[in-house]
Image (tube, rainbow, N blue to C red):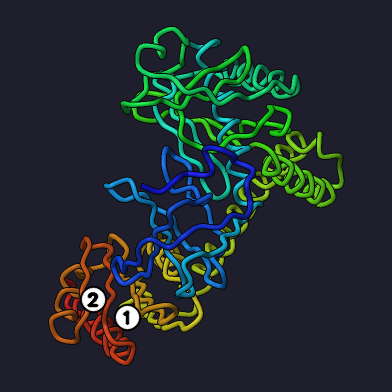
């Protein structure tokens, strides 16, 4: 079975090992070493990456027998001994996040009696799943503050080994899930938890653990956080973002909530005024269209085809035209996709719904509505003029016949 050097020294960045097996798993080449410093994905912590000789290590997994597979982008030399180099930046980041999680989990347990039931160390942020819902932000802020104090106190982080009988006397935060010798991470005077991950030697190396947000999740709470260099990166980006927003609003970042609220109020007022003016314009347009329209037995019949107008606007226009007596509006657009609307005043004979369905059967497309208002779409663009002509003929015949 592979000797796990990361258990002996999580800070080991370079090592030598002997290739004991070469495999291919789902088309990916992999090797097994007699000893390794590469951490395999486990317990919510991702695997290490780095190199074995000239080959890049793309993934590390533990197989059912306990051997550790190193998935590579190429072959390692046939020589028995190879040199492995850990991507230290990635490893140390994982150490900061994982130890930060232990501290935050204990803080939630102490302050809110919330037990950690899940942990995921992501590429950008990490999450802790708690077994109880935290409805307010008070417990979140208090847990973050307590974790911060433990980090700033630069407490030693010890690695203990115990059996099942000893575990009961150690006061661990959670019960171990495996038998045999049990590895326990001891944040001096604060937290003890069984864990097979890699951790920093002292809490001060974490620097900072910051909670970014929380949400209800499966009856409990999911907490999102960052620690170490990640926290610095997030704060730097957010500070720059706030600065840029402040310049856009011509104010200090601390004043952004009030400035944004003022902007939204002004925007709402402008939107209402814009809607009022647009309604007036369409009303005026409808009035002028009726005045210029051809008359059939005194009834204005309007037929127009647009290539640059939204259908919603045409529908409103048709309703404005036919809100007065003695008018028919047959309007179509080919913008985006062919669509048309047929509308008539209540005192005008004819059936918009029946006319639309007849046209759909003859010319393609589909649609329907009420006798006073119907719409259609889905017809070929070249068929739209014929649609309008047939609709106009429908109403001209019925206006002349009076039914």
Q: Which residue is mark 1?
A: 296
Is residue 162 or residue 220 the one in the foreground? 162
How far across and down, in percent of the image, does residue 89 sit?
A: 66, 52
| Marks 1/2: CA–CA distance | 7 Å
228 left or right, relative to 179: right
Rate crowding at label 1 as few (under 14), some (14 to 19) or many (20 or more) other CA atoms within 10 Å: some
How far across and down, in percent of the image, does residue 243 sit?
A: 82, 47
User: Where residue 253 is drawn, which disc sits there?
Assistant: none
Residue drawn at x 46%, y 16% as measured from the top left = 173
Provide the secondary structure element on which disc 2 rests: helix
**Which one is earlier in the sequence, the residue at label 1 or at label 2?**
1
Q: Quadrant of residue 116?
A: top left
How far across and down, in percent of the image, does residue 358 sit?
A: 14, 78
Residue drawn at x 58%, y 43% as measured from the top left = 94
Rate crowding at label 2 as few (under 14), some (14 to 19) or many (20 or more) other CA atoms within 10 Å: some
Provide the secondary structure element on which disc 1 rests: strand
Looking at the image, is 12 positioned above or below residue 203? below
Is residue 250 or residue 30 the one in the foreground? 30
- The reply to whether callout 1 and callout 2 are in contact (CB within 8 Å) is yes
Residue drawn at x 58%, y 59% as measured from the top left = 280
How far across and down, in percent of the image, does residue 355 sit?
A: 19, 75
Is residue 238 or residue 5 the one in the foreground? 5
Residue drawn at x 26%, y 66% as measured from the top left = 374
Q: Which residue is mark 2?
A: 399
107 left or right, relative to 374: right
Q: Quadrant of residue 256?
A: top right
């Amino acid at each position: 079975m592979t000797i796990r050097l990361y258990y002996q020294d999580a800070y080991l960045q370079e090592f030598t090992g002997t290739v004991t097996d070469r495999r291919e798993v789902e088309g990916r080449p992999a090797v097994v070493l007699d000893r390794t410093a590469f951490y395999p994905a486990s317990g919510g912590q991702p695997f290490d990456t780095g190199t074995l000789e000239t080959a890049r290590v793309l993934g590390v997994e533990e197989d059912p027998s306990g051997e550790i597979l190193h998935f590579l982008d190429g072959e390692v030399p046939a020589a028995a001994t190879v040199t492995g180099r850990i991507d230290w930046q990635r490893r140390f980041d994982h150490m900061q996040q994982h130890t930060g999680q232990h501290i935050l989990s204990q803080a939630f347990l102490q302050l809110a009696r919330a037990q950690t039931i899940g942990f995921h160390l992501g590429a950008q942020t990490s999450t802790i799943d708690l077994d109880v819902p935290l409805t307010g932000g008070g417990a979140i802020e208090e847990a973050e503050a307590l974790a911060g104090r433990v980090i700033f106190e630069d407490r030693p982080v010890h690695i203990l080994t115990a059996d099942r009988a000893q575990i009961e006397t150690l006061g661990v935060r959670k019960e171990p899930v495996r038998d045999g010798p049990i590895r326990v991470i001891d944040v001096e005077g604060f937290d003890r938890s069984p864990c097979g991950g890699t951790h920093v030697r002292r809490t001060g190396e974490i620097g900072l653990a910051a909670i970014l947000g929380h949400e209800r999740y499966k009856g409990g709470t999911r907490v999102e956080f960052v620690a170490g260099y990640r926290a610095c990166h997030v704060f730097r980006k957010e500070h720059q973002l706030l600065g840029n927003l402040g310049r856009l609003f011509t104010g200090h970042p601390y004043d952004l909530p009030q400035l944004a609220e003022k902007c939204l109020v002004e925007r709402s007022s402008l939107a209402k005024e814009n809607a009022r003016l647009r309604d007036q314009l369409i009303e005026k347009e409808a009035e002028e269209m009726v005045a210029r329209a051809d008359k059939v037995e005194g009834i204005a019949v309007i037929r127009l085809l647009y290539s640059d107008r939204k259908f919603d606007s045409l529908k409103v226009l048709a309703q404005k035209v036919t809100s007065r007596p003695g008018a028919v509006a047959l309007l179509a657009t080919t913008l985006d996709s062919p669509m048309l609307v047929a509308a008539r005043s209540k005192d005008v004979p004819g059936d918009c719904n029946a006319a639309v369905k007849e046209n759909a059967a003859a010319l393609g497309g589909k649609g329907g509505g009420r006798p006073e208002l119907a719409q259609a779409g889905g017809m070929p663009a070249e068929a739209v003029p014929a649609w309008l002509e047939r609709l106009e003929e429908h109403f001209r015949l019925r206006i002349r016949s009076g039914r």
